[in-house]
């Protein structure tokens, strides 16, 4: 479901429309809100900073992207990738709290938005596969009868 919403958002983003996509209850990707605007995808993840950094490195490796440069400290990591055609992806990961991490994937205003979308989707997959999400959104979503659901 989230991939379909992301695809719709990319079409709208290509038309100059800023779009907010919400992936509530998504099983493979448990982020809160993903914003797409002018070649940037921004997402907040309920996962620890170090887990998100590892997931981003693995995503680049899985997609056979060439890591040109990276800069890491205990609060912010920047990664610069290129594909075989020379298109670039800049990834910025920020620790917001012990349990919340921000990710920005930037392909540039005239870059290939689909490549950024694919990278972000691979990061979500890596986080899910490594069991890095700190909450089970399917269980916690009150609309699905989880925690906080109203009795009928």
Image (tube, grey):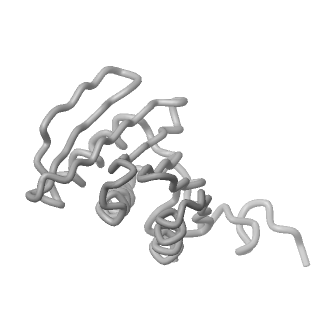
Q: Nearer the viewer, residue 99 or 105?
A: 105
Q: Residue furthest right?
A: 152
> Residue at 54% of width from left, 55% of height from top?
34
Q: Quadrant of residue 94?
A: top left
Quadrant (top left, top right, bottom left, bottom right) of the C terminus: bottom right
> Is 20 on the left or on the right of 94, as rendered?
right
Question: How far from the left and from the top, in percent, is residue 108?
Answer: 35, 48
Q: Quadrant of residue 72?
A: top left
> Is 103 on the left or on the right of 144, as rendered?
left
Q: Nearer the viewer, residue 116 or 86?
A: 86
Q: Nearer the viewer, residue 10 or 93?
A: 10
102 over 131 or under it: above or below: above
Question: How far from the left and from the top, in percent, is residue 103?
Answer: 43, 43
> Residue at 41% of width from left, 23% of height from top?
75
Q: Is residue 130 visible?
A: no
> Is 111 on the left or on the right of 141, as rendered?
left
Question: How far from the left and from the top, in percent, is residue 126?
Answer: 31, 57
Question: How far from the left and from the top, in percent, is residue 109?
Answer: 39, 50
Q: How many marks?
A: 0
> Is 143 on the left or on the right of 117, as rendered?
right
> Residue at 53% of width from left, 38% of height from top?
100
Q: Is residue 124 visible?
A: yes
């Amino acid at each position: 479901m989230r991939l379909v919403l992301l695809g719709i958002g990319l079409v709208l983003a290509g038309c100059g429309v800023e779009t907010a996509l919400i992936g509530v209850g998504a099983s493979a990707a448990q982020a809160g809100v993903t914003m797409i605007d002018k070649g940037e995808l921004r997402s907040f993840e309920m996962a620890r900073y170090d887990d998100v950094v590892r997931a981003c490195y693995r995503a680049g490796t899985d997609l056979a992207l060439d890591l040109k440069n990276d800069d890491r400290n205990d609060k912010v990591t920047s990664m610069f990738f290129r594909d075989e055609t020379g298109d670039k992806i800049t990834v910025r990961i920020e620790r917001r709290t012990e349990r919340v991490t921000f990710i920005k994937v930037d392909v540039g205003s005239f870059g290939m938005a689909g490549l950024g979308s694919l990278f972000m989707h691979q990061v979500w997959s890596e986080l899910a596969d490594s069991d890095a999400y700190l909450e089970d959104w399917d269980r916690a979503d009150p609309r699905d009868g989880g925690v906080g659901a109203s009795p009928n």
